[in-house]
Image (cartoon, rainbow, N blue to C red):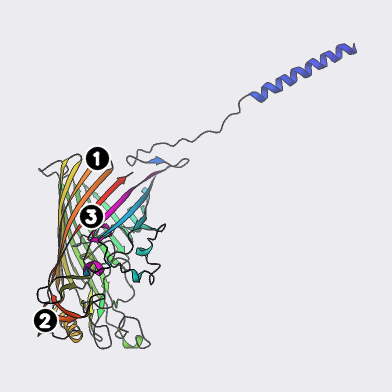
Amino acid sequence: MSAARNIILGSAAAILAAGGTHAADLPVKAKAVEYVKICSLYGAGFWFIPGTDTCIKLGGYLRVDTTFNGGTQGAPAWNGDLGQQNRYRDYYSARSRMAFTADTRTASEYGVVRTFLQADIQFSTVGNNTVNPNLFAALPTATSLLNNPGDGYVAVESVFIQFAGFTFGKSVSAFSTPWNAFPGNISSFLIGGHDTTTGVNNIQYTTEFGQGVSASIGLDDPVAFGRTSVYNIGAGASAISALGVSSNYYAGVRSPDVVGNIRVDQAWGLFQLSGALHEVSGSYNLANANATPTNLSEISGHPDARWGGAVMAGLQIKNLPTGAGDDIKVDATWSRGDTKNVVSTSAASPNFAMFSGSGVAYQSVGFGATTDGIYVPGGAIQLTEAYGVRGAFNHNWDPKWSSSLFGSYSAVRYNGAAKATYCTSYGAAVPGLGVTYSCNPDFNVSQLGVITRWVPVKNLTFSAEVMWFHLDQSFTGTATLTPTAPKPAAVYEFKDQNSVSLQLRAQRNF
């Protein structure tokens, strides 16, 4: 009996053990995997962020530029060591850039909520138009000098939120055309109109009326983008230098620029009218020659601020009979006290100073000062007038080859009171006014270029661009000048100047 009981119990234990073993071998239900889903709501390249209803698109490009007889990204040799053509100038400059973009979109009851970022990781030839190596130690933190081996820097072009027609952040101004300063060129220095390709801090609102008709209004922060210079010329203030420039006496910003546009964008092309209001304000009547304040500055008073502004018309004509995808883009701008909207790059507005040979003097020189206004202590700010036009004809030879012919013309004009003040100061520093030379700060600049592109495979483009730059200055005669070193104190002839640059680019979009 005992033996039988032991056999029964042992058999039961074996059966239970075997059952446990099989239970342990059964598969456990796996956690659900969230696969990435394609988002077709906003075009190709978007996908849903797992676990959310937000779509995202990642992209960018890698770009390599080399410019001969110019600065990075096609800057003409219009000032600095390149303008002087001295021994410090680089015969070429180069920049390598990787741009990353992140675009997110979420549907809501107010419409699409969008965020956008473009950040550029880049490395350039040391310096730019001014490349004297003696300056490097003095400016170790300057962005243009963060180009030792292993250096480079990150630049933020755009970072903004869009919601219910509003845009908040760093984005293209509402004053801009869709092409900004790139109607057909790759140079970042085709002046003659507005350029906020790299973004400006702003708040703007856009409304759509249907049939491609829209309107936008915005407030732009003018500090980083929207101002050139205000000159304070007079007793105890800055004198005009031998190359026609002075210190900047702009006061702190008190008002954003008010900008807006009305646009028609249809199958035939695009037409846009833009306007801007800009406050021009001087700091104090009394300051040191380099515009730094003294203990008497505050009690010296200041000029009253004045409002200037700009208007612009832009036109694009598509579907030309010359070929599929051919178009013409052109914009024309007039400004008063808002010169950055004409003499504009994605960086600061340039002053011009160029040298070349002469048959009657040591060398010839041409220069032009870019300002929003000029005043004398106790006087009103005299606003500077400027106007410009630029455009391009773009032609596709076949699916892999295309070319563009582009150009621009810009003019800067000073009124009678500003000219008298300017030339009196210049004549006090440079003897011979009215005898060996005449003074007139008005100037014009012209640009003409052609570019050809080759696309051997999709999203890979090789470009070659040649651009001529002409400075038409208004001084005449000769004078003894002391320009910026290494130029000597000598007799120089006032003369128009020219420069030709070549820019080569390889770019891969992704």
Q: Which mark is residue 456?
A: 1
Q: Which mark is residue 437?
A: 2
Proximity of marks 1 and 2: CB atoms separated by less than 8 Å: no
Q: Quadrant of residue 379?
A: bottom left
Mark earlier in primary sequence (1, 2): 2
Proximity of marks 1 and 3: CB atoms separated by less than 8 Å: no
How far across and how far down the image is residue 431, in percent? 16, 86
Residue at image coords 29%, 85%: 285
Proximity of marks 3 and 2: CB atoms separated by less than 8 Å: no
Examine the rendering and report whether any part of residue 108 can be seen: no
Q: Residues within 10 Å of mark 3 (few under 14, many from 20)?
A: many
User: Helix, strand or loop at disc 3?
Assistant: strand
Q: Quadrant of the C terminus?
A: top left
Q: Amino acid at mark 3?
A: Gln
Report the front residue among 473 and 82: 82
Q: Find the residue positioned furthest to the right.
A: 1
Q: Amino acid at mark 1?
A: Pro
Q: Label 3 vs label 2: CA separation?
A: 37 Å
Residue at which label 3 appears: 503
Q: Residues within 10 Å of mark 2 (few under 14, many from 20)?
A: some
Please give the range of residues in magenta: 55-83
How far across and how far down the image is residue 249, in percent? 29, 78
